[in-house]
Image (spheres, rainbow, N blue to C red):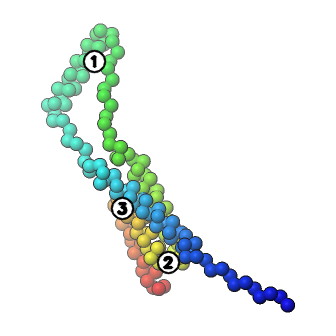
Amino acid sequence: MTPPHPKPIAQTPIRRHAFGWSGLIIGLLALALGLLPGWIAPLYDPPGKPIPQRAADWLGELKEKAVAVLRMEPTPLPPPEQRNAWRDPRIALSSLLLGFAALLMGIVSFVRHEDQRLVACTIALGAGAISSQYFLTAMVILVFAVLVGRMLARQG
């Protein structure tokens, strides 16, 4: 007599929805990277100097360079520009790449028939991260998200 076959172990919800949860976490990180610099750093650069002041500064630099050339001294280097670290293009690029990764995870979780809410949230977070950077690209992705939502509604 053969022993009865053991019952298959059911997958845990976390394991069964791995792509949805991963996409959700990646989407949250992408959205944070897309929105946080705008909240921390001002949206505009501080106002520049008025034109007469810039002209006077330029003439002063020109005079200093001419005197340095006549005296055969090395010209002094201009002071480095003060740039805002939160306006670094690498932050925006990271946000875009993570947003697209979240969209990809949402598509994979949709194909794997994972939880519909996870799929919708993952796609929405990815689209939100991208929309914080580029409006036209975000509109195309949001249309895609609406189409996916309608398909999910028909299946449910």
Task: Tell me, yes or no, if residue 114 can be seen here.
Answer: yes
Q: Along the polypeptide, which appears first: circle 2 or circle 1? A: 1
In the rendered view, tell whether residue 58 sits above or below residue 81: above
Q: Which amino acid does label 2 sit on?
A: Asp
Find the distance from the CA under tag 1 to the CA under tag 3: 47 Å
Q: Along the polypeptide, which appears first: circle 2 or circle 3? A: 2
Q: Along the polypeptide, which appears first: circle 1 or circle 3? A: 1
Q: Which amino acid does label 3 sit on?
A: Ser
Q: Nearer the viewer, mark 2 or mark 1?
A: 2
Find the distance from the CA under tag 2 to the CA under tag 3: 24 Å
The reply to whether callout 1 and callout 3 are in contact (CB within 8 Å) is no
Q: What element carries label 2?
A: loop
Mark 1 neighbour class, 10 Å CA radius: few under 14, some 14 to 19, many 20 or more = some
The reply to whether callout 2 and callout 3 are in contact (CB within 8 Å) is no
In the rendered view, tell whether residue 60 sits above or below residue 139: above
Residue 37: which disc?
Answer: none
Report x, y in % for residue 122. Answer: 45, 69
Between residue 55 and residue 96, name the one nearer to us.
96
Of all residues shown, which one is farthest toward the top?
71
Q: Name the residue under label 2.
A: 115
Between residue 55 and residue 21, name the one nearer to us.
21
Of all residues shown, which one is farthest toward the bottom?
1
Q: Name the residue under label 3.
A: 131
Q: Mark 1 points at which residue?
A: 65
